[in-house]
Image: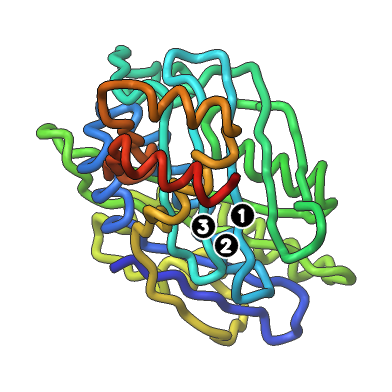
Amino acid sequence: MGKIVRYITKDGSAYILAADTTDIVSEAERIHKTSAVVTAALGRLITAASMMGVMLKGKDDTVTLRLCGNGPAGSVIAVSDSSGNSRGYVQNSVVELPLNNKGKLDVKGAVGAEGYLYVMKDIGLKEPFIGTTAIVSGEIAEDITNYFAVSEQTPTVCALGVLVNPDLTVNCAGGFIIQLLPGCPEETISSIENAIADIPSVTEMLSDNFSADDIAIRAMKGIEIEKLDESECKYRCNCSRERVEAALISTGIDALKEMAADDEDTTVECHFCDKRYIFTNIDINNIIKKVQ
């Protein structure tokens, strides 16, 4: 079970979310059978989505992150609800690249340094909010930071990390997001800058058995903070036969009739959890009767 905690400075001028998403990213790797560098990319985006989901206000609100770069991994997508339960999908699950010049997994090479990050927030309005920013690094954390600065005009620090074992399982995954609120005093800003100037990487902290709370406290070192709340979260897909049926209906009556005329069953596979839904000719004909 993943965990996300949220703290605020005692003067109410900044807050931090910190997350341990090891179990969530492990489940994503198990479902999608991703190569090491793709696990790192997908895991980082899922972690960011989980934290951004917790930032939503409505119980039924959701956020979708779609990273469309020019790298071989193709599109990377992560979706979260307001409790941080998330799911993800990547267009190309297996990409093999040499390590980067720091000896780390080359997430930038897999994602690409050119393209766009799309953030869609469904907060119960007639139309969802959609923010679009250019990819600035392909390392994902920097791209999330840039999104908040450009699209939401919110000064933000984002750190994300995924450590992959030699057998391609996930050793640990997590991250944190710090945001400054309007009127944040200069001394608080300086304290935050000093705190993160020499902070270990997220994976180093998690490997040293830091909890999400420990990461938040370390990232705000020297600053008085108070805990607001915490959320337990997991990899969760909300697909169902009813949703798939609605998707089939949306293809139109002519497409449904073509499916019904086909000798083979219609199989629909969920991109997020790989669950398969099978509709026989009888099922399709019953759907047609409903919409006619």
Residue 80: image tag: 3
Decide: few, some or many residues near mark 2? Use Cα within 10 Å; few <14, some 14-19, many ≥20: many
User: Nearer the N terminus, badge 2 or badge 1?
Assistant: 2
- Whether pointer 2 and pointer 1 mark residues with C-beta atoms closer than 8 Å, the reply is yes
Nearer the observer, 135 or 211: 135
Q: Are marks 3 and 2 in contact (CB under 8 Å)?
A: yes
Task: Please tell me whether residue 287 is drawn above or below residue 211 in the rendered image.
Answer: above
Find numbered disc 2 in the image and state the secondary structure of the residue it sits on. helix
> Residue 7 placed where, x, y %?
58, 78
According to the picture, the residue beneath numbered tag 1 turns out to be 63
Amino acid type assigned to the residue bearing label 1 in the image: Val
Query: Looking at the picture, which amino acid does disc 2 mark?
Result: Gly
Marked residue nearer the N-terminal end (3 or 2):
2
Hey, which residue is sitting farthest right in the picture?
183
Q: Is residue 68 visible?
A: yes
Residue 137 pos. (x, y %): 60, 26
